[in-house]
Image (tube, helix red, strand yellow):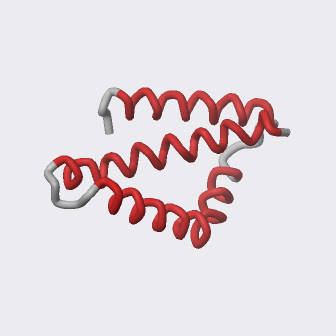
Amino acid sequence: MLIYILPSLFLGWSLGANDAANVFGPPVVNGVIRFRTATIVASIFVVLGAVLQGSKGLSTIGGLTEINLATSAVSMFAAALTVTIMTFFGLP
């Protein structure tokens, strides 16, 4: 069962890293906000967003197609890898 959970966690981490870098990158680089402060603020709002609105996102994604668990895990891993590579190269 862990093999199906890990791609989901990797996708969540990669999307969060990409979005946080897009939002907090320029202020941190220019010294407007400290890195630690940006990390704490981003973490708080990521958790709040997941708790308050996460079920709506899951129901939307779940209603798009009927695929099995293995195919879903492979798709999530591919998406997470793509976003991670894009973040590494500085692409939004």
Question: Where is 3 relative to 15, above or below?
Answer: above
Q: Where the N terminus falls, by quadrant?
A: top right
Residue at the spot 50% in from the left edge and 40% down from the top edge: 14
Residue sitting farthest toward the bottom: 52
Residue at the spot 46% in from the left edge and 66% down from the top edge: 45
- Residue 88: quarter of image: top left
User: Left or right: where does residue 43 sit relative to residue 70?
Assistant: left
Q: Where the C terminus falls, by quadrant?
A: top left
Q: Position of residue 28 (x, y in %)?
A: 23, 52
Residue at the spot 39% in from the left edge and 49% down from the top edge: 19
- Residue 32: quarter of image: bottom left
Q: Nearest the camera: 19 or 26? A: 26
Question: Where is 50 relative to 83, above or below?
Answer: below
Question: Where is 47 relative to 63, above or below?
Answer: below
Q: Position of residue 24 (x, y in %)?
A: 29, 54
User: Left or right: where does residue 67 sit relative to residue 92?
Assistant: right
Question: Where is 78 relative to 24, above or below?
Answer: above
Q: Nearest the camera: 29 or 5? A: 29
Q: Nearest the camera: 8 or 62? A: 8
Q: Position of residue 3 (x, y in %)?
A: 78, 33
Q: Position of residue 17 (x, y in %)?
A: 44, 45
Residue sitting farthest toward the left: 30
Tally the numbered discs.
0
- Residue 41: quarter of image: bottom left
Q: Nearest the camera: 34 or 66? A: 34
User: Left or right: where does residue 16 sit relative to residue 70?
Assistant: left
